[in-house]
Image: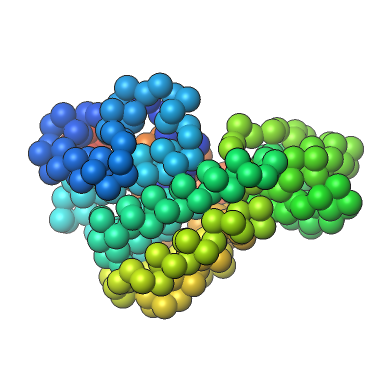
Amino acid sequence: MKRALVFPGQASQYVGMGQDIFDKHQLIRDMYTTANEMLGFDVADISFNGPLEALTETRVTQPALFVASVALFSLLPKSFNFSMTAGHSLGEFSALFAAGVLSFEDALAIVKVRSEGMQAAGESQSGTMAAILNMSREDIAKVCKHATARGIVQAANFNSPGQIVISGETTAVHYAMEIAKNLGARKALALNVSGAFHSPLMSPAKANLEAIIKKTNFNKARVPVIANVDASPTSDPVKIKSNLIDQLENPVFWEDTIQYMVRDGVDEIVEIGPGKVLQGLVKRINRDTVTSGIGTQEQLEAIS
């Protein structure tokens, strides 16, 4: 079988994630010690014990999910081969670690800057996101174009057929939700987020993110990484840097990413990290793909 690995982004976090592998493996305890020192707060304690309100702060969620995901990856047996990788939004940094592009410390340093910048951007401007169900891309584009009369709004995540997330200024997003429902969307659900991610409202976070990415050493990827911004494979460090900077303000083409993998012959997709969000999306995109997850010590032991 041809296998791809995928890594989750925000909304997959839960209190207690990573504690089982932390308790069992010195390697993972060392990774969390390094992370705590680099981040300036106890990411292990918040990940394992909460409270949930603290864990859902963007500046905490992103590094917490990154550390939990790459810790799980680091425990995979050497025989667990994969042909390509991708991650959803924040998960793209976990994918780059898995592909050998970034070291743990370098990736975490970038994630720290990204998460702090995104949280600050969200606090400085009134932005939000909403999931629109059962509408085509074409209709979503029309909805957003119409709703720009009230402010900035655009598609942010093309997650699966019939599930598209929009992002922008709060008044414009709420107006777009009304328009979508009037045009036949099955549901328009406001998301509990701290900002308008993957939209121009994240522009205040761009300068610092671009600066740290440009000065960090990126290796050539050992396997292709399918980029969020265009659902295309690349191993080139220069292109990967550009993709990560562009990703901040532009949509995540997740449905297209999985479709690319399937077209390229992938028949098994494994989600590495907390939760099952991506497994659900993969099933909605291509039900014939073998899908599984490795998010706990028990699941690790099942493949060893």
For the question of whether residue 1 can be seen, the reply is no
x, y (%) of residue 229? 56, 64
Vertical position of residue 246 compared to residue 153: above or below: below
x, y (%) of residue 13? 42, 34
- Check the picture and name the quadrant holding the N terminus: bottom left
Residue at 31% of width from left, 67% of height from top?
A: 101
For the residue pair 224 and 213, the one nearer the viewer reads as 213
Which quarter of the picture shows residue 190? Answer: top right
For the question of whether residue 64 can be seen, the reply is yes
For the residue pair 260 and 97, the one nearer the viewer reads as 97
Vertical position of residue 267 compared to residue 69: above or below: below
In the rendered image, the residue lying farthest to the left is 26
Residue at 44% of width from left, 67% of height from top?
A: 211
Residue at 59% of width from left, 56% of height from top?
A: 204
For the residue pair 199 and 134, the one nearer the viewer reads as 199
Vertical position of residue 210 compared to residue 294: above or below: below
x, y (%) of residue 124? 63, 44
